[in-house]
Image (spheres, grey):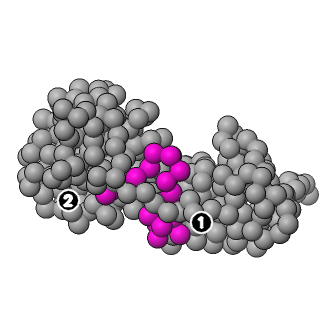
């Protein structure tokens, strides 16, 4: 699933390409992408709109439009947002979408296409069809995202804030990191990598962290997310960046997907367990399992 680094990569790549251009047409090819709004209604609502920017909130892409509106998109499990032009435009006869001539995707995976005023197109592709989009007035954005947690690169993401979020919680650290109401944008990949770098066991109770653990985890989360952005994201399965190219973060994984391989720091072996229904990779030798801190008795 695309996480913060993947979404941030797409936003940074596409914003300078899209800003100032007008939407000539938005064709929604899969009604699930825009539901409950009918595809034609969403297309009519954005036709002729000028794009003012492209940003990110958590794992959401935010396409800012004139008229104080935002087209919000979520890639979910297998979504991609790609800018195409020239020979990459859909060839109905071939039934294929061409990504820079190096990779093909079946045409049935195209969920929506946005035609710009210069002839280029913005495609939302999604094999598993979980991706979505909705148009919202900017005044309603704060309420819509009120339950979304702190941004990891914001000044508010401090060890103290992390401790406050985790206080008293018995959920495993891995599940805690995946809770988007706590920290926005961290997913399965970067949670594994952050916990390894912080030397914390994924099954440690979130509320068991001491100040030094909170500092180590905060720093590790920020570091691995920045590494992911610098590498253009992780392309394990379907993810491609805004140009249709693979990221390289998967080449820098220390534990994620490395089951049975040697730990980079010791002679131990990376193992895989399931935490909260998600595959979790870690080193049992290097990552300390913290004990639940006893509650203080009232005097």
Q: Where's residue 270, x and y in %?
A: 77, 56
Left/right of residue 163 with respect to residue 158 in the rendered view: right
Q: Residue at x 44, y 41 (%)?
A: 78
Tag 1 secondary structure: helix
The quarter of the picture where the C terminus appears is bottom right
Mark 1 and mark 2: Cα distance apart in space: 31 Å
| Left or right, residue 9 beside residue 112 | right
Q: Position of residue 224 (x, y in %)?
A: 58, 67
Q: What residue lies at 33% left-to-right and 35% top-to-bottom?
A: 106
For disc 2, the marked residue is 18
| Extent of the magenta region | 227-243
Q: Main secondary structure of the magenta part?
A: loop
Q: Is residue 267 magenta?
A: no
User: From the viewer's perspective, is residue 255 above or below residue 159?
Assistant: above
List the residue tagged with mark 1: 252
Neighbours of disc 1 within 10 Å: few (<14), some (14-19), many (20+): some
Q: Quadrant of residue 263?
A: bottom right
Q: Nearer the viewer, mark 1 or mark 2?
A: 1
Q: Which mark is residue 289?
A: none
How far from the left and from the top, in percent, is residue 107? 29, 34
* Of 121 and 187, the residue lying toward us: 121
Helix, strand or loop for disc 2 = helix
The reply to whether the C-beta atoms of the residues labelled 1 and 2 are less than 8 Å apart is: no
Is residue 146 shown to the viewer in this render? no
Whole-percent x and y of residue 267?
85, 66
């Amino acid at each position: 699933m695309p996480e913060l680094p993947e979404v941030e990569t797409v936003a940074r790549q596409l914003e300078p390409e899209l800003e100032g251009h007008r939407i000539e047409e938005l064709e929604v090819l899969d009604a699930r992408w825009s539901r409950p709004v009918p595809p034609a209604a969403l297309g009519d609502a954005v036709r002729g709109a000028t794009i003012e920017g492209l940003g990110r909130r958590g794992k959401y892409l935010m396409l800012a439009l004139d008229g104080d509106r935002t087209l919000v998109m979520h890639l979910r499990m297998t979504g991609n947002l790609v800018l195409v032009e020239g020979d990459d435009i859909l060839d109905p006869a071939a039934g294929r979408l061409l990504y820079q001539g190096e990779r093909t995707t079946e045409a049935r995976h195209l969920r929506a296409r946005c035609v710009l005023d210069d002839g280029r197109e913005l495609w939302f592709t999604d094999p598993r069809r979980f991706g979505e989009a909705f148009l919202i007035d900017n005044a309603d954005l704060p309420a819509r995202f009120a339950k979304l947690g702190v941004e990891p690169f914001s000044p508010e993401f401090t060890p103290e804030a992390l401790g406050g979020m985790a206080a008293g919680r018995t959920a495993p650290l891995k599940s805690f990191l995946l809770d988007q109401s706590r920290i926005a944008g961290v997913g399965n990949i970067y949670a594994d990598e952050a916990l390894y770098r912080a030397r914390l066991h994924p099954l440690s109770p979130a509320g068991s962290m001491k100040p030094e653990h909170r500092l180590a985890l905060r720093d590790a989360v920020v570091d691995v997310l920045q590494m992911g952005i610098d590498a253009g994201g992780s392309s394990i399965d379907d993810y491609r960046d805004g140009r249709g190219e693979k990221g390289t973060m998967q080449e820098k994984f220390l534990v994620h997907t490395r089951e049975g391989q040697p730990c980079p720091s010791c002679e131990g072996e990376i193992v895989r367990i399931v935490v909260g229904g998600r595959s979790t990779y870690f080193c049992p030798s290097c990552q300390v399992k913290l004990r639940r801190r006893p509650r203080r008795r009232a005097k």
